[in-house]
Each structure stands twice: as C-alpha cells, then as structure tokens.
Amino acid sequence: MTAVIARFIVAAFSLGIGGTLSVSAQTSDSCSSFASVIEGSSSSNVPVVPENLLTEWQTALPCLARIVGGLKITSPTFEPVVRSRFLSSTGAIRAIMTKMSVADDNAKKMTEEKRPPLQLPVFTTSFRELENFFEVVSVLTYGARNDSYDVRLNSVLILGNVLDENTVCIPLAQLFDFSLQQKPSYVNGRANLLAVTAVVAPYAYSEDFDNIKRVQRYFSGKIDSDSSPLKTTGIILKNIEQRLELQKPASNKSVPLPPEKKAKCKAYAEGLPADADRRENIRY
C-alpha cells in the first residue's frame, strides 16, 4: 500500500482537507510535451509520462488536468483510447502525489525547526484552484465507477485528496445514475462515490450537508449491509452518518453554498439523465 493510498484511507475516516491557492493557466507550448506523450497513446498502450516532466509540478499539474478534463467523459464506460489517456494522465498525477507524500512523511519525522513545509497540502490547494477543476472532478467521478480496477483506483486516490465542499455535488449527483446497476463494477463504483463523499461530510455547506444526509438515509434503506458484497458499503454509510455529526451549529452546515457554486451544482445535477430519486434527494 502506497503512502498516498494510506493517506486517503485515513482521510476517509477522519477530517477532510480545506483551503485554496491560485494556479495560473499554462500556455499550449508549455503543455505540448505532455500532450505528445499522452495523446499519442493507442488503445493497447498506456504511456508513462517521463519523470523529468513531473519535476516542476506547478507546470505539470495544469497540463495534466487539461488533458483529463479535455477527455469530455460523460459516462463511466470509457472507449479504449480514452481509457489509455485517462490512465496515463492520472497515473502521472498519482506519481507526483506519491513522491510528495513520501517526502511529507519523512519531514514529519524531523524536529520542528528543521522540518520543511509539507508539499501535499500545497498541491491539493493548487489542484482546487485549477480553472477546469469542476470538469476534472466530474471526469474522475465517472472514473471512480469504471469497470477497470486501475481506472477506479487512480480516480479515487486523487478524488480523496482534492474533492471539496464546492464539488461534492458531483459524486452526490452521479450516485443516482443507475445505468450500470447490473454490472459487477456497480457496487464498487457506488462505494467509491460514497467514500469520497464521506471525506467532505464534516465541512459540507448547508445544501450539501442536507443532501449528504438524505443520500445516506436513502442508500442505507436500499442495501442489506449484512450481505457479504455490501458490507463495505454499509460501513461507509455508517461512517458518513458519524462524520456529519462532527459539524457543530456554527460550522459550514449553517453556511449556504456561494451563489455561483450553487448554480453550477444545480446545473450539473439537472444535466444528468432525469431520475426521480435524484430530484428528491439532491436539492439546490
């Protein structure tokens, strides 16, 4: 288990991450090296982005995010070429995060006066300030429901670190897409979306605090948590309930979403295939 995997598992059952830091858009020229590696891939090949391109992560991150968001994914089913490009670009993001996580773990062992600033929190806040952050989260959320284990893993590890109170509406809305309900990956995909939602529960704004509460009750009433395939889902649902209780009266549950964020979440939910249960449980 990598340090980043361990970090997400801990995050899913403790407090989430917050904060923002601006990242400016990169020019097409600065991203051309990434595009030539990733977008030249075939359906049978997942190219590895060279480590030298990832050294300056402030340059690499916007370029990789542009490729991920530019895949224009609107379904958890990926075409082979899209899957290859997704795995290549998200694999590069994971590589950056893993290197930072290892460095941060080593830094935490140092005395306070010798300890360098932690890197992963800066990366996380930079990710959230990307111009296409909302679109990238949408693509990653579809990826978390994909029938490929590798696609789901990359998606969940990144989402578990970067999903925030302004974008948790995306997995909440996608939870009511039942189009793949008969596929084996459906249970895993649903558990993944509930798990990343759990990370944000302690600091979700009022609308999504209520949405998360309704979603938790809805799915708790739909599954048999004693059934072997659904035990993990049952544990996650119980954890969501516990994490919602961490919010106190003066916390974010009393604060509405900023108007522009609320409008974006509303439009996103309404733009998905119509579903009566979504309309009942996801409200903006």
Image (tube, rainbow, N blue to C red):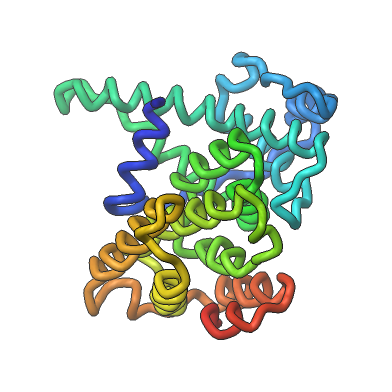
Give coordinates of residue 175: x percent, y percent.
Answer: 57, 65
Closer to the camera in the image, 119 or 186? 186
Quadrant placement of the N terminus: top left
Q: Residue at x 37, y 63 (%)?
A: 237
Closer to the camera in the image, 63 or 83? 83
Q: Left of 135 or right of it: where is 280?
A: left
Closer to the camera in the image, 17 or 229? 229
Image height of 167 relative to 46, above or below: below
Residue 27 visible (yes or no): yes
Q: Left of 108 or right of it: where is 99?
A: right
Give coordinates of residue 268: x percent, y percent.
Answer: 67, 70
Q: Residue at x 74, y 55 (%)?
A: 75
Image height of 268 relative to 1, above or below: below
Q: Residue at x 48, y 75 (%)?
A: 257
Residue 132 visible (yes or no): no
Give coordinates of residue 47: x percent, y percent.
Answer: 73, 20
* Residue 53 found in image quarter: top right
Quadrant placement of the C terminus: bottom right
Q: How many marks?
A: 0
Give coordinates of residue 126: x percent, y percent.
Answer: 51, 44
Image height of 135 relative to 97, above or below: below
Q: Left of 253 or right of it: where is 163?
A: right
Q: Residue at x 40, y 70 (%)?
A: 220
